[in-house]
Amino acid sequence: MYKTQLNKRTGFTLIEIMLSIALLMILASITIIAINPSKQLADSRDAQREADTFTLVQAVYQYASDYEGDFPSIITTDETEICATNATSCEGLSDLSALTDSEKYLIAVPVDPLCASVVSACGQNGTGYYIKLTENGRLYVNASSSENKNIIVIQ
């Protein structure tokens, strides 16, 4: 004589499933807040800006070492935005094409990471990076649209 149980159920109840989903949502939101993806992305863009400014400074100094210590004549004591490689016009910008013409110093002038997505990050035909000579004759490069820290290289 075998007894059958009709009321024996296997699986989860609706309340158990809802509690599990609620717990997962709470944990996911805490994780997202802790990671703060917008700050992480801004930090990575700032790291790129920092690398770009050092690249620009090194290229200008390599140029100067090849030309008896003379910087490209376009670099003055007035801080001006650097013109992008292959720009249609470099009027009012620092045209560093002397560094990119033979690709000896740079293949292309670096461009701020936000230039492609945010119109105000760069001027028209600009890179988002600014250059000048200080009163002491030192080279000054600035990434003006840095997000979490000031990025200025003076050498």
Image (cartoon, grey):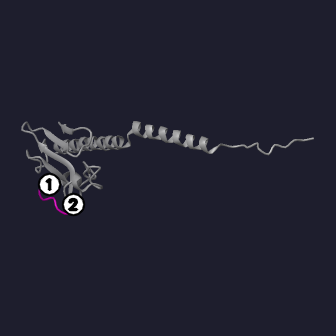
| Total numbered labels placed on residues in the image | 2
Mark 1–mark 2 distance (CA, rounded to whole Å): 10 Å
Q: Which mark is residue 93?
A: 1
Mark 1 element type: loop
User: Among all residues in the image, which is located at the extreme bottom?
Assistant: 88
| SS assignment for the magenta stretch, majority | loop
Residue 70: x and y in percent read 12, 44
Q: Amino acid at mark 1?
A: Leu
Q: Which residues are magenta?
A: 87-94
- Mark closest to the chain's N terminus, 1 or 2: 2
Residue found 22% across the figure and 45% down from its top: 56
Q: Quadrant of residue 101?
A: bottom left
Magenta residue check for 118: no
For the residues labelled 1 and 2, say whether their Cβ atoms are less than 8 Å apart: yes
Quadrant of the snapshot with the C terminus = top left
Residue 69 horizontal side relative to residue 45, left or right: left
Q: Which residue is mark 2?
A: 87
Residue sitting nearer the eye, 138 or 150: 150
Magenta residue check for 90: yes
Quadrant of the snapshot with the N terminus = top right
Residue 107: x and y in percent read 28, 52
Residue 147 horizontal side relative to residue 6, left or right: left
Q: Amino acid at mark 2?
A: Ala
